[in-house]
Amino acid sequence: MKKLNSALFVGNWPPPFGGIASHLYELLPGIVEKGIDTYTLSFQTEADEIQKLENGVRNFFFNPFSNFKRRMLWILVYAIINIKHKKDLSLKKYLRALSIADKVNCIVNEHGLTHVFTYDNDQIHITPFLKSKFHNLKIYSTIYAGFYVNKHLYETEKKFLAHAFTFPIKILSCSKYCADSGKEFLGIEYKTKVLYNNVLENIYYPAISGKRIRQKYGIAEDAVVLMTMGRIGYEMGIDFLIDYAENILNLDEKVTIFFVGAKGELSSQVEELANKYNRINFAFDISFEDKPEYFACCDIFTSPSKQNYPCMGIANIEAMMCGKVVLSSKTGGHLETIEDKISGILVPFKGNQLNAEIYLSELSNVIASKDLRLNYGIAARERGIRLFTNDHIVEQHIRLIQE
């Protein structure tokens, strides 16, 4: 029996806490509170499926390859029926998309759902195979920066993607920069809506104490902490901070650099750096519950992401909500998140590299002035409350579902 106002979110559900996961972790319980039956479907490497209920959200975890093996006959029949939708999509991606779509279709059918939200560029692959089964199903697809930063992954399937983009009612993203990425890459037009990433202002706020975190990592009370939070990899600009760590430490004897986030390809280099300098610390794979205290322990937050990479930067918003001055790269969705020299600082690129001279100069200014940090932090919090609260983004989703 079809339910009025019910939704399945196909994407990454925590843990681990990447940007998509953090967004859904706070958003979906808010949607449940508004009376929407809410489900998620996420992927795992293990063969066994897991179902659990968390904060009122019914979660399904499954393995696409295992699902394909288990339902191979039906999926192969479905592949023949839907061959007109394949276009130039590779056989491997076609069968994977069918396996995911098969699982989505089963959940939609079993629970009578009315809406499906997909997350990440790759999940646009499943949209033709949902619509062909449920003609009245309303599909919204959220995309990110993949068409900017990983063009090579999609060059051979442009015909399919242009076709797949016709099935969602709207293409969503957390910034106009990313929402429009398919238009530029594929040369097509489609309806878009920007839904900013959301933050719970009663969890991330300026009065939180970071004392426990400072004590845990031996950071002095009077230290000026420059923190980054995200995957410890190249895309997040961690290599920039590694390369210029000594220059940063030399700006002031009270400066401490704190690398926080999910382990990535540069984790070992960060550990080596921390062993070399006693004013460099790291914390990998922290819990979601502890995140606000980590933001509270810092004085300056930085996100020197690579050019064209960030769609928005949810960590920037979390830091802004905590009343922190944010120093980020001038690219992608950062330009929509931060008002330069008002609610934060945006550092331009010089060629393909972040301009180190300007970065160090701006950093030196905010290190030297507590009042400057405070003023930026107040403006950042005000902008966060105006645009990025969870209640505001929940209401925008509710309006979409109730259209």
Image (cartoon, helix red, strand yellow):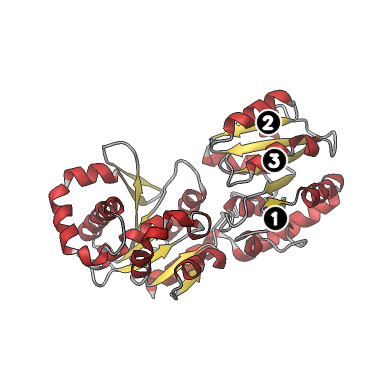
**Dot 1: what SS?**
loop
Q: Residue at x 64, y 66 (%)?
A: 386
Q: Provide the residue designation for mark 3.
A: 241
Q: How many marks?
A: 3
Question: In terms of sequence position, does the residue under pointer 3 or pointer 1 come before the other?
Answer: 3
Residue, x 49% and y 58% (percent of image)? 144
Q: Amino acid at mark 2?
A: Asn
For marks 2 and 3 on the same chain, the one whose residue lies earlier in the sequence: 3
State the residue position of label 2. 281
Say if 183 sits above or below 14 in the image: below
User: Quadrant location of residue 283?
Assistant: top right
Q: Is residue 174 left or right of residue 121?
A: right
Look at discs 2 and 3 and give the one toward the viewer.
3
Task: Name the quadrant of the C terminus.
Answer: bottom left
Mark 1 — residue? 351
- Asked whether the beta carbons under mark 2 and mark 1 sit within 8 Å of each other, the answer is no
**Can residue 288 be seen in this snapshot?**
yes
Helix, strand or loop for disc 3: helix
Residue 338 pos. (x, y %):
68, 61
Q: Pick the residue in front: 146 or 335.
A: 146
